[in-house]
Image (cartoon, rainbow, N blue to C red):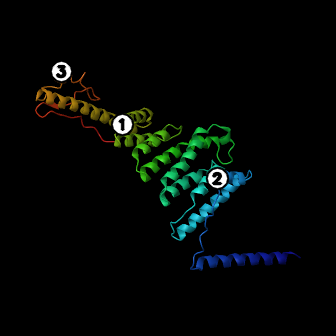
Amino acid sequence: MLRPFVALLLAMAIGLQTHLLHSHLTRTVLPPAVETVWLPPAPVMQVLALGYDHVVADVLWLQVIQYYGGKLIAKDQHMPNLWPYFDAITTLDPGFEEAYYFGSYLLADDLGKPDLALTLLDRGRRYFTESAASDAVASSARVSPARVSREAWRYAYQMGFIHFFYRHDKAEASRYFQMAGTVPGAPPICNRLAAALSEEVGERDTARRMWGLVYQTATDTYTRARAERNLARLKGEEDIETLRNALDGFRTQNNRWPTTLDELVQLNWLPSLPVDTNRAAYPYDAQTGAVRAPLIGSH
């Protein structure tokens, strides 16, 4: 008796879906974008959630995705009030990885607010590194302890990129790449980026330490050779600078260049002569006072 009625309902449902799909594909006016609403501070949201923290975080996350998608379709870059959403989502559910990744890029790139992006990422960094072995993380409904340990390095790493690309601060970028490199499971690129940026900002001691770490931990011959070349080049640059200062002082006092570099030691301008990584003396021209390092491949 009920079969014809059920069949009729099914046909009506299919017809309605077909009509809605046709209307969606053929309309020329886009639907209005979902707008955000004012949110109370994140701690208040946590109280209002009444223990359903993950559920409320999911609802807010879906609203952010709908809102962002609508803005992209409408080509509208005006997106106020998004920080309170990411603040609330990651407060309600600190293990919500996607909120950190997507939120940091949206805040830094689309909204031009890299400082808020860094605040968001630092929250994730602290949660996934400092609390990796705690009961709070182990009991998270989203993140297993194994995944926590695998992914923890990414937060400091992404903070390094935010500092480099959006704040143009190479020194801070290097510091966060170094931080990422200390987290178990971090890839070698973290230390290589930290070393290269340290050189660019003139932090030679840090660069030497980081390239030494790359050399010690390298698992392939190319990376080890690259680190070795950079260590040799850094040593050469520092030695040439030491010799150059001593030579200039010698010439100022004696109105001539030393006949050989040994004179710098004999007259107490240097305690000893530096040598290159092959234990060879640096080439010196007594006529011009020029001293140079051996040619070494670049980094």
The residue beneath circle 3 is 267
Task: Decide: is 143 above or below 59.
Answer: above
Q: Position of residue 180 (x, y in %)?
A: 49, 41
Q: In which image quadrant can residue 241 be found? A: top left
> Gap between marks 2 and 3, in whole Å?
70 Å
Rendered image: mark on residue 244: none
Q: Say what secondary structure mark 1 lies in.
A: helix
Q: Earlier in the sequence, mark 2 or mark 3?
A: 2
Q: Nearer the viewer, residue 268 or 187?
A: 268
What residue sits 39% from the left and 35% below the top?
Answer: 206
Q: Is residue 134 left or right of residue 152?
A: right
Q: Residues within 10 Å of mark 2 (few under 14, many from 20)?
A: some
Which residue in the rendered view is the most extreme toward the top?
266
The residue beneath circle 2 is 42
> Gap between marks 3 and 1, in whole Å?
38 Å
What residue sits 60% from the left and 73% below the top?
Answer: 32
Kind of residue at disc 3: Leu
Q: Is residue 101 left or right of residue 240?
A: right
Task: Decide: is 273 above or below 207.
Answer: above
Kind of residue at disc 1: Ala
Q: Residues within 10 Å of mark 3 (few under 14, many from 20)?
A: few
Q: Say what secondary structure mark 3 lies in.
A: loop
Q: Earlier in the sequence, mark 3 or mark 1?
A: 1
The residue beneath circle 1 is 225
Q: Position of residue 221 (x, y in %)?
A: 39, 37
What residue sits 36% from the left and 36% below the top?
Answer: 225
Q: Position of residue 11 (x, y in %)?
A: 75, 77
- Quadrant in which the C terminus appears: top left
Number of numbered discs present? Answer: 3
Nearer to us of marks 2 and 1 is 2
Q: Position of residue 138 (x, y in %)?
A: 67, 41
